[in-house]
Image: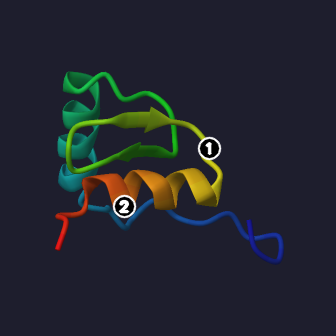
């Protein structure tokens, strides 16, 4: 409600992408945000400290 005026429901949003994403999350058993998935398959639901994220990224990066 803005300035005492109730919005009309004339406009419709395309939610196809959200539906597809929701199905993928269910398939992968992801129910928490954030969820980080690293290249080698490690999945971390929820918050993670920056130093641990950097460590996981370093471990998944190809060695030169």
Residue at horizontal 41 percent and vertical 51 percent from the top: 56
Residue 4 percent across, percent down from the top left = 82, 70
- Secondary element type, mark 2: helix
Q: Nearer the viewer, residue 41 or 47?
A: 41
- Secondary element type, mark 1: loop
Q: Quadrant of residue 22?
A: top left
Foreground label between 1 and 2? 2
Q: Is residue 30 left or right of residue 61?
A: right
Query: Where is the N terminus found, in terms of image quarters?
Result: bottom right
Check disc 1: other Cα within 10 Å, few if <14, some if 14-19, many if 20+: few
Q: Nearer the viewer, residue 41 or 6?
A: 41
Q: Which mark is residue 33?
A: none
Q: Which mark is residue 58?
A: 2
CB atoms of marks 1 and 2 within 8 Å: no
Residue at horizontal 50 percent and vertical 33 percent from the top: 32
Considering every residue shown, the one lying at the far right of the view is: 4
Q: Is residue 60 left or right of residue 54?
A: left
Q: Quadrant of residue 47?
A: top right
Q: Which mark is residue 47?
A: 1
Check disc 2: other Cα within 10 Å, few if <14, some if 14-19, many if 20+: few
Query: Where is the C terminus found, in terms of image quarters?
Result: bottom left
Residue 59 percent across, percent down from the top left = 33, 53
Q: Quadrant of residue 61?
A: bottom left
Residue 35 percent across, percent down from the top left = 44, 42
Quick one: label 1 or label 2, which is nearer the N terminus?
1
Residue at horizontal 24 percent and vertical 44 percent from the top: 21
**56, above or below 10, in the image:** above
> How many numbered dots are placed on residues in this image?
2
């Amino acid at each position: 409600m803005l300035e005492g005026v109730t919005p009309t429901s004339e406009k419709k949003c395309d939610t196809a992408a959200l539906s597809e994403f929701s199905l993928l999350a269910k398939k992968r058993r992801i129910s928490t945000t954030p969820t980080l998935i690293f290249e080698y398959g490690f999945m971390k639901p929820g918050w993670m400290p920056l130093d641990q994220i950097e460590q996981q990224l370093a471990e998944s990066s190809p060695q030169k």
